[in-house]
Image (cartoon, rainbow, N blue to C red):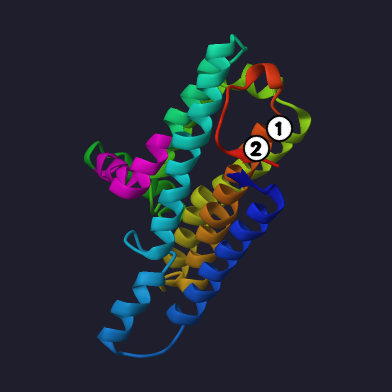
Amino acid sequence: MKINRKKLFITLLIIAVVLFVLHLILMTRTTNSSDYWEFAKFFSLDEEVSMPTWYSQTILLFVPALLLFYIGWTKKKTGAKFANHWLALGGVFTFLSLDDGAMIHEKFSTISRLIGLQSDLNHVNAGVFAWSWWVLYVPIFIIIGLFFIKWFLSLPTRTKILFAVALVLFMVGQVGGEVITGAITHNTGVYAGPVWRGLDKFVGKGLGLSLFLWSVVDYIHFMPAKEKLPLKIEVE
């Protein structure tokens, strides 16, 4: 089976846009029908149990299971450098998939309240820190990121740029979105609404994760032949 990089890129982009448009169409409608909202939430980007969330979880599983672990495993078998870094990155994405499904980040917000951190953050800015999970998550991922610096610098320029853009989109959507919508809700007294909540998920999970998946496929295409092992999937 062959994977056409151009077609894959277009497909991922179309899916992300379609999910975002469906979210806007269904979630901005004015109605008091509980049956309607029960149906509409299935396509909501802001719901933890919905079609868009399943899609992001699929990407987060597909990346480490079929691509990153393959890259790490083949590099390890061929004696190439940074094999363990690829395997570790696969582990990070496996955790992110688990987090998306089991809502681990929500538990971090609970921990924040238990240890009194949420109360302290509220005194600083109750809007910006409305969802405090990111205050605990960001330092952890910065520390993890230090482990990947040499690996990142070793990547081809093309891959470095693609990975960096994908990471920025993901962080802007996931963390920046939480900060902005939290501030809007706190300062106006009105929930940020489906447009803002949909936009941050679209940028983070829709564009960020889709670009990262495509970037990994693109990297496989340009991997040196001496670092590859036979694979029934060919990237063209």
Does 174 sit left or right of 207 as displayed?
left
* Residue at horizontal 46 percent and vertical 69 percent from the top: 192
Is 106 covered by the magenta stretch? yes
Q: Mark 2: give few (<14), some (14-19) or many (20+) Cα within 10 Å.
A: many
Count of residue discs: 2
Residue kind at label 1, given as amino acid type? Lys
Residue 130 disc label: none
* Residue at horizontal 62 percent and vertical 12 percent from the top: 81
Label 2 residue SS: helix
According to the image, label 2 marks what residue?
163
Q: Nearer the viewer, residue 118 or 210?
A: 210
State how far apart marks 1 and 2 are (Cα): 5 Å
Q: Quadrant of the N terminus?
A: top right
- Magenta-highlighted residues: 94-113
Q: Where is residue 118 drawn, in percent x and y? A: 32, 45
* Residue at horizontal 77 percent and vertical 30 percent from the top: 157
In the picture shown, does residue 45 fall above or below 210?
below
Taking the view exactly as shown, the residue that stands out farthest to the top is 79
In the picture shown, does residue 25 fall above or below 14?
below
Label 1 residue SS: helix
Label the magenta part by its dominant secondary structure. Answer: helix
Q: Where is residue 144 drawn, in percent x and y? A: 49, 24
Residue kind at label 2, given as amino acid type? Phe
Q: Where is residue 154 drawn, in percent x and y? A: 70, 19
Q: Nearer the viewer, residue 77 or 231?
A: 231
Residue 235 lies in quadrant: top right
In the picture shown, does residue 28 fall above or below 161?
below
Q: Are marks 1 and 2 in contact (CB under 8 Å)?
A: yes
Q: Where is residue 173 drawn, in percent x and y? A: 54, 53
Is 72 covered by the magenta stretch? no
According to the image, label 1 marks what residue?
160
